[in-house]
Image (cartoon, rainbow, N blue to C red):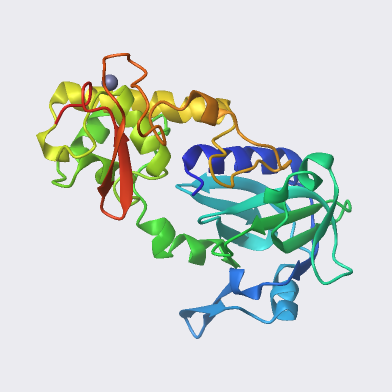
Amino acid sequence: MPELPEVQIIVDDLNKKVSGKKITGVWSDWRKILNLLEKKGGALKLIKKPDLGEFEEAIKGKKIIRVNRRGKNILIQLSGGSMMLVHQKMTGHFLVGEWNTASGKAVATKPKSIVSDPYNRFVHVIFYLNDKSMLALSDLRKFAKIIFGNKKDLEDLPELKELGPEPLDKNFKFKDFKDIISSKTGKIKQVLMDQKVISGIGNIYSDDILWLAKINPFMPANKISNNGLKEIFKATLIILKKAIKLRGSSISDFRDTAGKRGGYDKVILVYGREGEKCLRNDGGIIVRKKIGGRSAHFCPVCQKL
Ligand SMILES: [Zn+2]
C-alpha cells in the first residue's frame, strides 16, 4: 500500500501537472471506486457507486485549485468549495497522460513511461481536463476510493477527522511524539502503523524506521526509554524524507504520475530482507515474524527485545 512518501510524491506531481486545469468529463468502467457525498435535509449521505452521469454532472466544470495530502489520503481542492478525497488503498495510483477508451477499456497512448509498464494498465477512472491531458487512476485490485463533495463535509468524515498528527509537520516535535507514543501499550510497530496515533506510516517504513532506531518491533510502546523514543522519532523523519527524495518504493505496484518506479527499493534497510545478513554486519540474520495481520522484519542482534 502506498504510504506517506508515495502519496506525497503523487500530490507534488499533481500540483505541478494538473492544478489550474478544469475537469471537462469523467470516464469509468468500475463505478464502485466512485462516491458522492451529499447533504440532504441537513444530514450527510454517502452515495456509493453513483450513476456515472450523475457523478460527472457534479464534478464537470470544476477547476483543480490545489492538491494536498492528509495521512495516506489525497485531497484535490476544487472550485466552488468542493473537494475530491482519494484513498489509493492497496494498488491505486494516479497517472497523468492520454488514454483511448473506444474499446470500452482505457488504453494509454502517451507518455511512453506509462504505456510501457504493465503496472499502469489497470485504469478504471479518467478525468478529462481542458488542455486535453487526462488524470487517470490505475488500480489493479480496484479497492481505491474517490469521494466527491463539499470540502467542509468531507473534512468531517472519520477517515480525515480521526487521523493522528503528521510526522513531517514542522510543528510536530519530539515532545508531541513522546506524549502520544509513550501512552500506548501496544507493540511499537503496530502503534506506528495506527493511523489514529500518527498518520502516514505503513508496513514498509515502520520496519525500516525501527531497524534504524535499533528498536524491536514487538517492544510495548510504553516500555521504550526516552532515548529509544528519540531514536525512533529521528529515524521516522530520516526514512520518510529519504523515501520522498528517492521517489518512493515500488516493491508492489507504486508508480509516480508518469508511470515510473521509485528508487527506495534499492536502499531498503530491512523490509523484505528475510534470511539476509543485517546491513550492520553484526552477525544477525533478518527474521520475519507475524504481528497482528502483518509481518515485521528485524535483526535479532541489533534490535533485541
Ligand atoms: Zn543487526
Describe residue 218's horizontal placement relative to residue 158 as left or right: left
Going 35% across and 50% down the picture, which residue do you hit?
A: 195
Going 22% across and 40% down the picture, which residue do you hit?
A: 188
Describe residue 54's horizontal placement relative to residue 81 as left or right: right
Q: Is residue 70 above or below residue 86?
A: above
Front residue of 135 and 211: 211
Residue 50 spot, x, y in % from top left: 63, 80
Residue 284 spot, x, y in % from top left: 26, 22
Residue 229 spot, x, y in % from top left: 21, 28
Residue placed farthest to the left in the image?
Answer: 223
Q: Quadrant of the C terminus?
A: top left
Residue placed farthest to the top in the image?
Answer: 281
- Residue 201 visible in the current orientation: no
Going 19% across and 44% down the picture, which residue do you hit?
A: 187
Quadrant in which ligand 1 is drawn = top left
Q: Which quadrant of the structure image shows residue 137? A: bottom right
Q: Which quadrant of the structure image shows residue 171? A: top left
Residue 43 spot, x, y in % from top left: 45, 81
Describe residue 14's horizontal placement relative to residue 299 as left or right: right
Describe residue 259's horizontal placement relative to residue 233 as left or right: right
Residue placed farthest to the front in the image?
Answer: 275
